[in-house]
Image: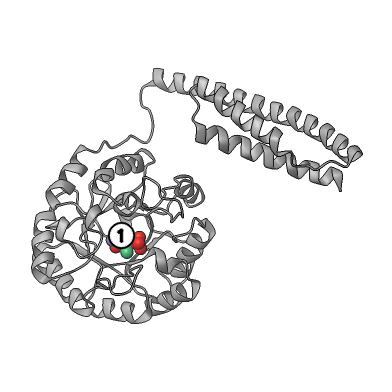
Amino acid sequence: MDLLSINNWGVSKNGQPLGIMGPCSAETEVQMLSTAKELVHKNVHIFRAGVWKPRTRPNSFEGVGEIGLQWLSEVKKQTGMLVATEVASAEHVRLALKYDIDVLWIGARTSVNPFAVQEIADALYGRDKIVLVKNPINPDLELWIGALERINQAGIKKLGAIHRGFSTYEKLNFRNAPKWQIPIELKRRYPDLPIICDPSHIGGSRELIYDISQTALNLEMDGLMIESHIDPDCALSDAKQQVTPEVAKKITEQLLLRNHQLNDSKQINQLNNLRQQIDELDHQLISVFSQRMDRVKDIGELKKEGNVAVLQTDRWNDIITDRVNSGAGKGLSDIFIRKIFEAIHQESINKQNVIVK
Ligand code: PEP
Ligand code: MN
């Protein structure tokens, strides 16, 4: 992808993370202007508001439509902030361009759909706009990258990704599971692509915004999109996860910005030494995995001779219970041990399936 960093977007942020704030939905002109005026602050660079809302169930508030774009223009005129809204179709793009909205974002329910993303890309062809692509609701990095590529191929270089978490069937602490490894992998593959974290949609509750935002900054994400409403409890959508402009300001002031690297030479030496130890330990792990797989293969031969099923549920049950207990005694979390041993067990089954064929 041929990308410009935030520094070339025409947004001056003076070393701060990029701040995109504003209500989930545009509701009234008064709500928009009063929220926006209180958000004018050094940590806020772009004002957001959705005017077409993709609601899970019908008969919910589905946004005010075109008139909300007029209110966004008014916000821009009165505050000087850049303004952003969500687009989900070519018609939305046409209207957003008509009102000269500066930043368009593609929502999570749209980035799952290549037809819709392509339609948006075609409608945007050659325009000089900042376009942000939220992750698709399912944890599929390729689909997220595909959506970014479609927009990029329309000649849009002021491109960014928004990490807003992923839907899960189980109810977690989070509204949308962050699955941090996915944006980390996106950053590894596209180091120049700005990634903005949306702690409001990840957390689903205002109490979680600070911690999620700090985690995002610990991972050197480039900005934060935080939903802020002048009267959050009365918001027509996403009331629980919105904060007043005052709280949004406090949150951003309390966040710690991390340095990219250590500066002190003594600390750099210590870091290098510890990393060397990690490298050695990782190679030991690989060697132990390989020894373990040799035993697995021997057991596979026995299972073949005896024509015994590869999966032995009782044994697997004993293993996972024992390893989780043993890990707990060494301060390793249940979830971590389960993930590791499930992966090892799956690999063992794959190896034995080949042998018993
Ligand atoms: C939003 O930003 O208000 C929104 C609808 O978000 P998402 O697409 O992440 O659900
Ligand atoms: Mn919302």
Circle 1 residue: 9
Viewer-proximal residue among 234 and 209? 234
Q: Quadrant of residue 268?
A: top left
Query: Residue 356, percent across and down?
Result: 86, 44
Q: Residue at x 42, y 49 (%)?
A: 177
Up-down relation of residue 109 to residue 348 (above or below): below
Q: Quadrant of residue 23?
A: bottom left
Q: Is residue 306 left or right of residue 329?
A: right
Up-down relation of residue 271 to residue 236 (above or below): above
Q: Residue at x 18, y 40 (%)?
A: 253
Viewer-proximal residue among 286 and 191? 286
Quadrant containing ligand 2: bottom left
Query: Residue 124, percent across and down?
Result: 37, 76
Amino acid type at circle 1 is Trp
- Callout 1: helix, strand or loop? loop
Query: Residue 219, percent across and down?
Result: 39, 41
Q: Residue at x 37, y 65 (%)?
A: 107
Q: Is residue 304 left or right of residue 222?
A: right
Q: Quadrant of residue 164?
A: bottom left
Q: Is residue 115 left or right of residue 34?
A: right
Q: Residue furthest front?
A: 314
Query: Residue 346, percent across and down?
Result: 68, 42
Up-down relation of residue 182 to residue 80 (above or below): above
Beta carbon at label 1 within 8 Å of ligand 1: no
Q: Is residue 57 left or right of residue 80?
A: right
